[in-house]
Image (tube, rainbow, N blue to C red):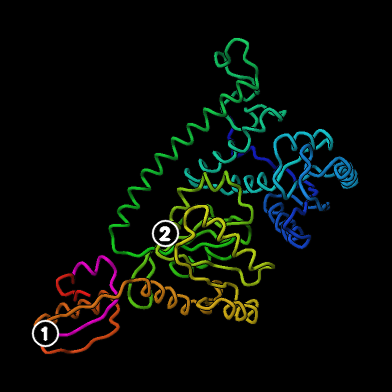
Amino acid sequence: MTDALTDTLIERSFREKIVLVGVTLPPDDAEETERGLDELSALIDTAGADEVARVVQRRQAPDPPTFIGKGKAEELLEVALATDCDTVVFDNELTPAQQFNLEKLLGRTAIDRTAVILDIFAQNAASLEGKAQVELALLRYRLPRLRRSGKSFSQQAGGMSAGGGARIGTRGPGETQLETDRRRIVRRIHKLEADLRDIQRHRDTQRKQRNRSRTQRVAIVGYTNAGKSTLLNRLTDAGVLVEDRLFATLDATTRRLDLPGGESVLATDTVGFVRKLPHQLVEAFKSTLQVAADAHLLVHVVDATAPDVPGNIEAVHTVLREIDAGTVPQLLAFNKADLDPETAATLVKRHPGSVAFSAKTGEGVDELLEAISARLRAMQPVVELSIPYERADALAAVHREGEVLVETHGDTGTLVQARLDEGSRAQFREFEVEA
């Protein structure tokens, strides 16, 4: 049986030559298209291939048969022949029909940005859950394209004999190879969905336990390769793999982090986001990404040296909204300040409340921790307490458990205004002053 993750969408036995195609559609402009192609080029490199040429076009709407129209497709064929490329990759999403028509016209593989990202995820999946999530996304992508493909399911996703034929007894009377492949791929999808539901139930149990604890949760989110894993390693000695490439981290890692005020939080590194993150991946990774929706605070790490910082920030916000984490409070943290201090300082001025730091050198990390601590404290409700003088132990506990804002002495006791989380507040309910 072959493995869906070892037979992905870009050949790995040699570095393929790739022609990139970008189409500018309203409301985007040519500059946005070029930024998209630059990022696609980096994705291609991460997947193990090389860009050899680009073809760009401006259209009011995609051409239904080929996306780019017959004339531009013929121009693309000339470029493909001149560069002797192996594959053509579109920055725009292709329908199965467009993909089939282009491959027929070009005489070579035509895929889109979604396929490249799926390929990279397949290369980087490490845990059992991560592999199941990626395989599910790959199969959901391939299923509607199965009728257009010359490959059988045995070549694409496992589950059949190595020779490509169905095992004896698996094909019904008059059933075609295509029908057999489709049935097997659907069965595999259902199996993966069931496996991931089991993992989700276990994760839900863990989440309920975390919610019952008084430990606050911080999720580190951000664009891919922004430095999230490097930051978690610096803060907690987590030992997360760090590589200078896109999507090096797919599996969430959680570690306890001690803040300057003495309080401890759970800090979790998450998978990096990217523009046009495939819906199949967002759906497949929702259980993993749930950690962001459940967090008390998101530390949104941004590469201050990136070519399009506002675009990267908005791309992360788009994915956060899609996973129901758009309303979780965020702290913007501009990384790689050591490489360009002036730009980092400008970004902090432009985004009040943000901080600049370097996960690599440690510069500004103390200020980042102070900011995390302050933001978490600020989110806790202010409670007014009247503590009798004979209960000095309770007053000491308030100082220990929360942040005392105001403390005055009355005739019979001490009046305190303090920020307390729900767990701590329950301890001092008898001393609360009704509003």
- Say which residue appears at 65% left-offset and 71% top-offset: 305
Label 2's element?
A: strand
- Say which residue appears at 75% left-offset and 53% top-offset: 25
Q: Amino acid at mark 1?
A: Tyr
Q: Amino acid at mark 2?
A: Thr
In-image side of 264 versus 331 (left or right): left
Q: Residue furthest top?
A: 173
Instruction: Name above or below for residue 264 compared with residue 89.
Output: below
Label 1–label 2 contact, CB within 8 A = no
| The disc label shown at residue 380, or none | none
- Say which residue appears at 81% left-offset and 53% top-offset: 58
Q: Earlier in the sequence, mark 1 or mark 2?
A: 2
Please name the residue that numbered disc 1 is placed on. Answer: 389
Part of the protein shown in magenta: 412-427
**Which quarter of the figure is the N terminus placed in?**
top right
Q: Position of residue 404 (x, y in %)?
A: 28, 81
Q: Residue furthest left?
A: 390
Please name the residue that numbered disc 2 is placed on. Answer: 254
